[in-house]
Amino acid sequence: MPRTTHRESHKLHNAGWLRAAVLGANDGLISTAGLVVGMAAAGTELKTLLLTAAAGLTAGAFSMAAGEYVSVSSQADVEQADRATEARELAERPEWELNELKQIYVQRGLSPELADQVARQLTEKDALGAHLRDELGITAHSAARPLQAALASAASFVVGALLPILVVLLYHGPGLTTLLVGATLVLLAVLGAVAAKLGGAPMGKGAARVLFWGALAMGASALIGKLFGTGMVG
């Protein structure tokens, strides 16, 4: 019989860029829509609305990129420090580290004899890799990638922020605030559901939690605009 290879589809390898992309898109949509809703509720003219949205998009995209890069770089620094520490300990105390690896496997359910055998074989093949993976939880899938996270976050922020700008550009009639809030909530629900689907979580739950915070943000922005503005657009 022909030999077949079984391939499993896991979500973990998407975790880094997916988290940054979802965060960026949600932030771009919510923050830019909140700015525009607040300004529209204050009775601001079209030119100022567009300028506000464009400024929010530009500043937000760079802010998200910088924030993600600094945050993930800090994680990468910690991983590098742990890697160096583990390499030094393996060089200075190899038997101690071998026993430590053995105890990890015993705690996971292997017999002491089998744990010793597994620990020795993995140590012979890649001692540092075995300790990074099984002692510290650092793997190729979970390793910090600052530039990837920064680019994904910035690009998705721009995509999310484009909706409020398009609404203001294409619609000049009454009810702008209502239309903008409605369109934003619909897209937030879609983004939440898609992100949950990609991450293997329930789509309804993903949509609901994004909708809650998006509605709260725009409601607060509209209230501020009405309280301190000169009138209501739509």
Image: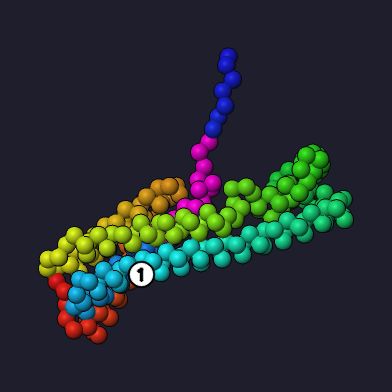
Colour convention of the picture: rainbow
Q: Please report the residue visible at 61 percent of the width from the left and 53 percent of the height from the top.
A: 143
Secondary structure mainly formed by the magenta segment? helix
In the displayed structure, would residue 60 be above or below residue 19? below
**Quarter-wise, where is residue 69 in the image?**
bottom right
Q: Please report the residue visible at 37 percent of the width from the left and 63 percent of the height from the top.
A: 28
In the image, which residues are magenta?
A: 8-25
Q: Is residue 115 visible?
A: no
**Quarter-wise, where is residue 169 in the image?**
bottom left
Residue 81, horizontal then vertical, whole percent: 72, 61
Asked if the magenta segment contains residue 37, the reply would be no
In the displayed structure, would residue 129 be above or below residue 169? above
Amino acid carrying label 1: it is Gly
Q: Please report the residue visible at 28 percent of the width from the left and 59 percent of the height from the top.
A: 163
Residue 13, horizontal then vertical, whole percent: 54, 46
Q: Please report the residue visible at 44 percent of the width from the left and 60 percent of the height from the top.
A: 154
Mark 1 lies on a secondary structure that is: helix
